[in-house]
Amino acid sequence: MSNIMNIAIQAGDLTFRYPSQQEGEGRPVFEDLNLQIQEGSFVAILGHNGCGKSTLAKHFNAILLPEGGSVTVFGLDTKEEDALLDIRRTVGMVFQNPDNQMVANVVEEDVAFAPENLGVPSEEIRRRVDNALKAVGMYDYRRHAPHLLSGGQKQRVAIAGVIAMKPRCIVLDEPTAMLDPHGREEVMQTILRLNREQGITVILITHHMTEAICAQRVVVMDKGRILTDGSPKEVFVQVEKLKQAGLTVPVTTELLYRLKQAGYDLPLDALSTEECAQALCNWAKA
C-alpha cells in the first residue's frame, strides 16, 4: 500500500476566515495551513483559546468548508457535495458538552439514533449498539436514563453513539472540558482503547497537557498556524517556545525544567509521573 493510501486527513494550503460583523473581510483563522494525519494514529491538537484548533476540527468532517486550499478525508474532498454523507459517516465528532448530543430518554436508544438515521437494518443496529456500549464500558447502563449518569459516563455514551456509525476516524473537541478528574480519566482510557484495539484514527483537541502525553503525536497551534509538531517528548522539551506562545507544559516537565534552570542535570523528556520519579531517583543516586 502506498503512503498516500495511509493518509486519513489532509489539509492542503487551507485558508479560512469567519465573516466579519462589520464591512469588509473577517480576520483569517488560517492561511496556507498544511497538515497530514495518518490512518490509525492518535493525534492531540493543542493550543490556547482562539488559536484555531476547534475551527480546524470542524473542517475534518465538513461542518466548515475551506475558503481556499482543500481538506480531504480518506481521499474525499470536503467541498464535493456528493461526498458529504460519506465524510460524515467516516469522521465522527464528539463535542465538549455530552448533554448537547443526547437525543433520547434511554441510553441504548440514544446510541441507536445515528445508525437509524443512516438507514441501517434493525438487526445490525442492535449489534452495533451493543458492541459500541461494550467498547466504552457502558453496556450495563444500556437501559438507564442518560440524565441520571455522571459527566464521564454521559461522554462515554456520546462516544458510543459515534462508534455505532462505524467511523474510521473520531474527532473529539475538548471532550473532557466539563468533567472532573475521574470523568476525564474514564474518557481518556476509552479513547486510548478505541485507538489501540480497533485501530480508529483519533484526533483529540485539548488544552490539558496530561491528556496530550497519551497521544502518539502532538500538534501545537498558535494564531492559526502550526507552532510545532512531533511526538510528546519532542514537543514538550521545547518549554521556552511553548511558554512564549502562552501555553503551559505537563507538570512533570515544569518540575524538571525548573530544577534544570537551577543547575541540576535532569532530562526534560520524562513526561509520565513514573518517568519523572525515575529521573529524579537516577539523579539522586549519581
Image (cartoon, helix red, strand yellow):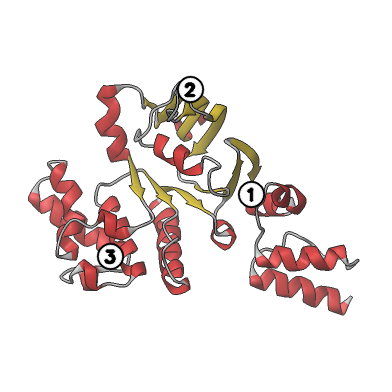
> In x, y percent, where is residue 100?
28, 55
Determine the secondary structure under disc 3. helix
Q: Residue at x 74, y 74 (%)?
A: 278
Determine the secondary structure under disc 1. loop
- In the displayed structure image, the side of residue 14 where residue 155 appears, left or right: left
**Mark 2 or 3 closer to N-term?**
2
Tell me the amino acid under the disc marked 3.
Lys
Residue topped by disc 2: 25
> In x, y percent, where is residue 233?
68, 54
CA neighbours of label 1 inside 10 A, class few (<14), some (14 to 19), many (20+) = some
What is the number of the mark on residue 231? 1
Circles 2 and 3: CB atoms closer than 8 Å: no
Distance Cα–Cα, label 2 vs label 1: 37 Å
- In the displayed structure image, the side of residue 236 where residue 89 appears, left or right: left
Residue topped by disc 3: 134
**Mark 2 or 1 closer to N-term?**
2
Task: Classify 82 as above or below 211.
Answer: above
Indicate the quadrant containing the C terminus: top left, top right, bottom left or bottom right: bottom right
Name which quarter of the figure residue 91 lies in: top left
Determine the secondary structure under disc 2. loop
Most foreground residue, 137 or 187: 187
Q: Residue at x 27, y 23 (%)?
A: 81
CA neighbours of label 2 inside 10 A, class few (<14), some (14 to 19), many (20+) = few
Q: Residue at x 56, y 51 (%)?
A: 216
- In the displayed structure image, the side of residue 17 where residue 219 appears, left or right: right
Q: Residue at x 77, y 70 (%)?
A: 279
